[in-house]
Image: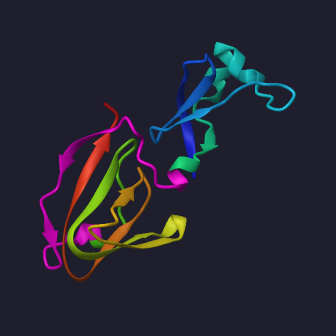
Amino acid sequence: MKRPIVGFDTDAHGDWAALLSCGHRQHVRHKPPFIVRDWVTTAQGRERMVGVDLDCVRCDRFELPGEFVAYKRTPEFDETSVPAGLRRDHSTKVGVWAKIVVVDGRLRYCVDALNTDLELSRDRTGIVIPEVMHHVAPIGAVRFYVEFYRAP
């Protein structure tokens, strides 16, 4: 999934990493002749790359950034109280991740942009990627809530 670069920092070894809008970091090393990214070696080069999309494989794998923290939770919904907005395509804002936590029963979680159709249960939590359209549908009786995450 393509995500724009919003900034840069270095790791413990001094290697540059791009900060992506989703909250993930991706190394952007300049190690010729195998990896040529001479733009990363100057402040002006890095500044020119802000806004450029990189492929975020962690988003493709539905990985919530490890340092993100929960900050809000919905009430518990059941098959009759699921808001209409959750049943149709919707998304979270930039940098906002979520977990769909099923307390009891089963819930269908669809992310058409990633060709993903999952059946969630107590044993399988759904991860919501920022800005990616998705929707849910109860599969019989179900109880669930949504917990939202952001950078600390």
The quadrant in which residue 5 appears is: top right
73 with respect to 28 (left or right): left
- The residue at 61%/16% (across/down) is 14
Q: What is the tally of numbered marks visible in this picture? A: 0
Query: Farthest residue in the right direction?
Result: 33
Q: In the image, residue 27 lies at what x, y percent?
A: 62, 31
- Indicate the colouring scheme: rainbow
The quadrant in which residue 77 appears is: bottom left
- The residue at 42%/72% (across/down) is 118
28 with respect to 34 (left or right): left
Q: Is residue 111 magenta?
A: no
Quadrant into which the C terminus falls: top left
Q: In the image, residue 38 lies at what x, y percent?
A: 77, 22
Residue 22, above or below 110: above
Query: Farthest residue in the front direction?
Result: 123
128 with respect to 13 (left or right): left
**Residue extent of the magenta highlight:** 59-86
Q: In the image, residue 124 lies at what x, y percent?
A: 34, 66
The quadrant in which residue 65 appears is: top left
Q: In the image, residue 94 lies at what x, y percent?
A: 40, 43
- The residue at 69%/22% (across/down) is 40
Q: Nearer the viewer, residue 69 or 88?
A: 69
- The residue at 65%/25% (across/down) is 48
Residue 106, above or below 58: below
